[in-house]
Amino acid sequence: MKTAFIMQKEIRESILTPKGFSWYVLTSVILSVLSYLFLTNSELSLLDQGQMLYMIMNFITALGILVGLVFGADAFAGEVERGTMEALFLSPVTKAEIAIGKLGAALTNWAIILAISLPYLFVVGKGGQNLLIGIAYVAILGTFLAIIFSAFSMGLSSRVKSVKNSLMVTFFIFLLAGAPIFLSAAQRRTWFGRILDFINPFACAINTFDSVVIDSQGLAYQAGRVAIICGYLLLSLWFLKRSVSRLEM
Amino acid sequence: MADYTSAFAASRITAAIDPPSIQANMGDKITYIGTITNHSDRAVNNVIAYISLANVTQGKESPMDLEDWSANKAIKVYTIPPHGTYKGQWPMRLIDSGSYVAYITVVDKNDNIPISSPMSRLKVKRVLRLNPNNVLPVAIGEPVFIGMVFMLIAFKRRKRVK
């Protein structure tokens, strides 16, 4: 299948390379430091297991988003700058198939990060509450967010056609989406903070993690936030489709 | 008429705390039992009882914020019958080492002075945790394993280029 061929090509060029794989080495080192810090620090080690699990879940999701944004920024702009876009267009693959193949490779990135994170989730959450359900939520919502941000970044990359500019915009988007982590709980409870939380898919995800892992609330309680994330999913895929359809040599 | 300047007001209520002293390790969970006794001939209604903790370690004397120690700081007691008692529980997680005193305070809006129990002495020993939750095999092993895969990929690539 042509999409699978594009996906394999992307995986070979971006993931199965020393430069690409170094992301995963860094990921595991950071997660090792965080896990050890959480579990041995004289104050943090006595945090509730649920809270530690929640914090690690947020970090893993943020990492998945970041990697998706960076990968997406290079997706089309990188091909243009390397002069390989023409060859890609001349091949018997449609633009949509190219986009899906590249998105598949971006998701493969996320899948590898999630696989690397699983042992850390188990060791941090061991003996605590809602470990398995928390892992299920991070896998599902993390995948949705990886698609959202990768698709958006790829769409932007196809419009901007410059890796540097694409990366700059995606980093600003990452800071904006990651704002909930930097703001205090009190700031997020203001009317403006609540609006930001409501329209931000990443905030929806971390509030869901909080609700499931710490407050043990069920799926019905998460319906609104999950619906918002699904809405963004459709929007980002539509944006990618529109952007790629306008792509020309 | 109530005498606001008096240091010792006759009160219908007394409070006690158990156990009178504890020695434990950091991370342990303990439970204080507070006993509120109504010595009067009338029922006592809507009293509030809460636990307080103060650090009495030499050089670190200060009141403690119980947010991380105890989820159950204040209890509202709806009624204690005449000459009856109420026993409340205050589970606590010992999150830092040192010497502390814990006591129960009871507030009755019909009295001018809150009633405190005698202090319970608490000694928490510091525990050094080198490998909590068996984190070390994962924290060290996984980066090493992924690093080895990384080196294998780099080696294969270099071989292909040659």
Image: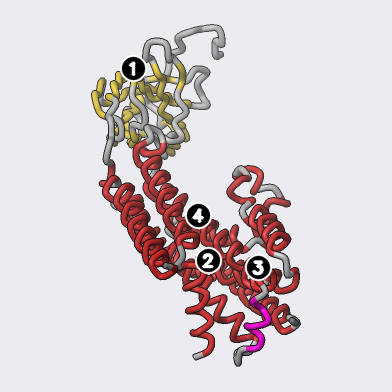
Q: Which residue is mark 4?
A: A58
**Residue A119 in the image: x percent, y percent?**
33, 57
**Colour convention:** secondary structure
Q: Which residue is mark 3?
A: A153
State how far apart marks 4 and 3 are (Cα): 21 Å
Circle 3: residue type: Ser
Q: Which residue is mark 1?
A: B118
Circle 2: residue type: Gln
- Along the horizontal axis of the image, is B100 left or right of A175? left
Task: Tell me which segment is drawn in magenta.
Answer: A84-90
State how far apart marks 4 and 2 are (Cα): 16 Å
Looking at the image, is mark 1 or mark 3 nearer the viewer? Answer: 3
Q: Earlier in the sequence, mark 4 or mark 2?
A: 4
Q: Chain of mark 2?
A: A
**Residue A172 in the image: x percent, y percent?**
69, 55
State how far apart marks 1 and 2 are (Cα): 47 Å
Looking at the image, is mark 4 or mark 3 nearer the viewer? Answer: 3
Looking at the image, is mark 1 or mark 4 nearer the viewer? Answer: 4
Whether residue B56 is situated above or below residue B74 in the rendered picture: above
What residue is at 36 percent from the left and 28 percent from the top? B96
Q: Is residue B63 visible?
A: yes
- Density class for disc 2 (Cα within 10 Å; few <14, some 14-19, many ≥20) is some
CB under 8 Å between discs 3 and 2? no
Circle 4: residue type: Asn
Question: Circle 3 — which element?
Answer: helix
> Please, which residue is most extreme toward the front here?
B162
